[in-house]
Amino acid sequence: MTGQSTPLTYAPAISYGWVGRVAHQAGLIVMGATHPRKSGAKGLDGGTLVLLGAGSAFWSVLKTSPEWQGPDPVDRWSARVIGQMAQELGGQAHFPFGGPPYAPFIDWALKSQRTFSSPVGALVHDTVGMMISYRGALHFPQEFDIPEVTTASPCVECPAPCTTTCPVGALNNQDFYDVATCHAHLSTEEGQTCMTGGCLARLSCPVSAGADRDPEQSAHHMRAFHPS
């Protein structure tokens, strides 16, 4: 699957690996999975939940899609592509947008045991650090095998540069996130470094390099967060 809805032939038996391969073709990555019956993931009964996020190829795929020319391209692309995946794979699609009410993605992320709370309160993932971009999730009625997670939070042995990197202290380990101070800084000349390249505190996380994030994508998200 690509941003242009390239048809695929799907295997009859769904597996974690198969979902991952389909996601990869779309420019997405599997960011975690859980069995709600065992983990108690909110709002779900049984089955298997697979969380999907933006991979390193996501931005280039999005820019060649029909959604790129209209408003809210990221959410519209996610709704179409993940919705199509759900239909063809036999699952139900959920999205972190479109509410209220909103799907409990923070709870699901934590229940996957691959995402953790960072010292500044923001979520941190075991492979993409603080550059998290959940685009949706697929809930399947059947339970299939998912990898056993044994990874501890990457913050355990980290010197936590995220707590001191923000030039105005908006992200810190005391009051976590001062949104007003962040917005005020982004409106200044000095704040344009964050606006064009992404949040410096999130980028300072050593694991964030694993996201291989295109700076243009970060700038897009920053403009959505702080429109001029």
Image: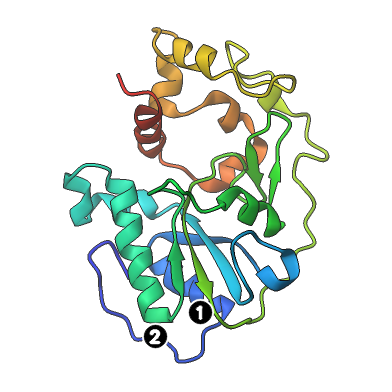
Q: Is residue 194 above or below residue 136?
A: above
Q: Is residue 46 above or below residue 127?
A: below
**Left or right, 211 with reference to 161:** left
> Element under label 2?
loop
- Say the numbered circle drawn on residue 10: 2
- Say the numbered circle drawn on residue 18: 1
The amino acid type of the residue labelled 1 equals Trp
At 49% across and 55% down in the image, what residue appears? 53
Where does the image place residue 46, in percent across and percent down from the top left?
64, 75
Where does the image place residue 208, in percent across and percent down from the top left?
59, 40
Residue most toward the front?
101
Q: Earlier in the sequence, mark 2 or mark 1?
A: 2
Q: Is residue 164 visible?
A: yes
**Left or right, 159 with reference to 100:** right
Cα separation, mark 2 vs mark 1, equals 9 Å
> Element under label 1?
helix
Q: Is residue 8 above or below residue 183?
A: below
Image quarter where the C terminus lies is: top left
At 46% across and 16% down in the image, what residue appears? 183
**Left or right, 197 with reference to 113:** left
Q: Are marks 2 and 1 in contact (CB under 8 Å)?
A: yes
Residue most toward the top?
189
The amino acid type of the residue labelled 2 equals Tyr
**Left or right, 119 with reference to 211:** right
How many numbered discs sit on the rendered protein? 2
Where does the image place residue 138, in percent across and percent down from the top left?
49, 68
